[in-house]
Structures are given as structure tokens and as C-alpha cells.
Image (tube, grey):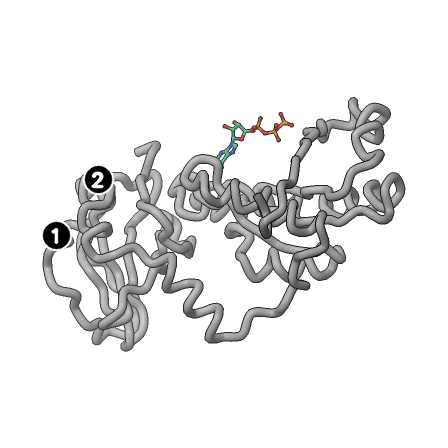
Amino acid sequence: MVDSKAVAVETEGTGGSPYYDNVRPLCYSDSDAVLLCFDISRQDIFDSGLKKWRTEILDFCPSTRILLIGCKTDLRTDVCTLMELSNQKQTPITHEQGSAMAKQLGAEAYLECSAFTSEKSIHSVFRTAALACINKLQPLAKPSPTRRLSKRLLHLPSKSELLSSTFKKEKAKSCSVMGVGSDCHMIDVRDPSSPPQRNTNQNKRTLCCPPCPEFFNSAYLFFQYPAFSNEYALETTDGRIAPGVVEQSTRPRSC
Ligand SMILES: Nc1nc2c(ncn2[C@@H]2O[C@H](COP(=O)(O)OP(=O)(O)OP(=O)(O)O)[C@@H](O)[C@H]2O)c(=O)[nH]1
């Protein structure tokens, strides 16, 4: 049920490979909406692939609605993904970049989801697509700074979640904490129950040596006292910084 209406949603998944170029257009006919999905860790697809798909969609079903979907948002906090991206001097696509791209492509909505960590986010994609099909979708609006902030705060993990997070379990692996900036409070992931310390040193500082030097020198969480910030960063062994946002917990999987 969407907006008190029963909406039957029939989906067709298309293959992206050029091998299917002749077959894929068969899926476009009679479609009410196209979900243009990309992996938020793939800058290359984001930069060039999406425009290619838009061109194809416009060729075969010019009046259909397009919804842009940023997939695999769990990878924003996946240490290995961040390391790989950092090695290519990249970071995951942000929500703001996705929204801007949606406007550029003329999409009716920009949504993000993770099949791994949020079933609700997948439901939300299909619900929004259904709303678009019955013309009940609000046009894309640029979020005001206040809305952006409250959206961010909604995703903040609670202190107890953080304290019981895999960071604690993996503390032998991600052992160092650094803080940057005087407003930043930091918490030592080696002892998450310790009170946040105000960072008096404007420069980053490393508190201990890493036991996992092939991946990173340090992992640090920022806390804006009294609220928790959900930003964190990792420093690679050659000094590059991979920033990210904690949405769930962060586990240095390959260590
Ligand atoms: N981290 C993460 N991986 C995901 C997620 N969703 C899918 N994957 C992985 O991404 C890969 C592709 O997933 P599929 O469901 O096959 O995606 P698809 O669009 O059908 O891909 P094609 O078969 O290439 O058309 C698989 O290895 C999945 O396990 C997600 O939300 N997060």
C-alpha cells in the first residue's frame, strides 16, 4: 500500500555488460520508472557510467521517471574499501554528491541503500519508486544545512553502540587514536570507556604504534562534545588520510 493505494510493482533487473546491449532495451518498454543504481565506492561509474545509462534510458523510454540510487552505503565505513580508495586518492561518493548528480541527470529522487545493513532502506527505494509512478513524489529539494545536520544526527551511533562496537573488539588491531582541531574531542579506541579528551593539539597526534602497519598507522574517531560526531578517519602507513562516516561499526576486516 502506498498512500492508501495498492500498487503492484513489477521489477526487471538489467545486465550492465555491453554483452547485453541488444537485449537490455527490451526491459525499457512500458517501464514507469527506472532505478539507476550505482555503487558508492565506484567513482569511475559515478563519473562516466551514469551519464551513459541516462542517454540509453532517454533513447528507449524518454518519458519514464529516473530515480538515482546510491547502493552499498555500508562500504562508507568498510576499512578495506576506504584503504583501497585511499590508495587511488579517492573517497566514497557522499550523499551530497549523489544528490547533485541526481539533479544533473534530471532524476526525480536520490536515495541511498545497503542490502547488507538496512533492509528498510531497500523498502524505501521501492516505496519511493511506487510514489513516483503514481505522481506523488515531492520534487528533489536541496536540503537546508539544518536538515542536513538533523539527517546526520539521526544516523549517529549511540555512545553505548560505539562502546560495544567492533572497534572495541578489534582494539588490538586499530590501536591508535588521533585528534585534529581544537573543537574535537577524541576517544581512545584502546579504551573506549575512558572519557573523551579535548584535543589541545591542533595537529594530529598518534598515541601508540599500530600492530597492523601494512594497512594503517592509526584509526581515530572524532567526537564533538557533548554530541558524538560520526566522522572518523584512518591514516595509511604512507600518511594519507581516508575520511569516512560511521554508520554502523567499523571492522578492519583484512587485518
Ligand atoms: N557491501 C555490499 N555489497 C553488496 C551490496 N549489495 C550487493 N552487494 C554485492 O555486490 C555484488 C553484486 O551484487 P548483485 O546483487 O549480483 O548485483 P547486480 O546488480 O545483480 O550485479 P550484476 O550481476 O553484475 O548485474 C555481490 O558480490 C553482492 O554481494 C551491499 O549493499 N553492500
| Disc number for residue 191 | 1
- Residue type indicated by callout 1: Asp
Name the quarter where the N terminus is drawn: top right
Q: Is residue 20 left or right of residue 85?
A: right
> Residue drawn at (41%, 54%), measured in percent from left and top?
244
Name the quarter where the C terminus is drawn: top left
Q: Check disc 2 and report the residue beneath it.
A: 170
Q: Earlier in the sequence, mark 1 or mark 2?
A: 2
Disc 2 on helix, strand or loop? loop
> Residue drawn at (25%, 63%), measured in percent from left and top?
205
Seen from the viewer's position, the closer of residues 27 and 225 is: 27
Seen from the viewer's position, the closer of residues 44 and 57 is: 57
- Residue type indicated by callout 2: Glu
> Residue drawn at (68%, 43%), measured in percent from left and top?
36
Seen from the viewer's position, the closer of residues 191 and 135 is: 135
Q: Is residue 122 left or right of residue 29?
A: left
Q: Quadrant of residue 220?
A: bottom left
Seen from the viewer's position, the closer of residues 229 and 79 is: 229
> Residue drawn at (55%, 52%), measured in percent from left and top?
93
Report x, y in % for residue 16: 72, 31
In this figure, what is the number of numbered marks? 2
Report x, y in % for residue 174: 24, 45
| Ligand 1 shown in quarter | top right
Report x, y in % for residue 42: 59, 43
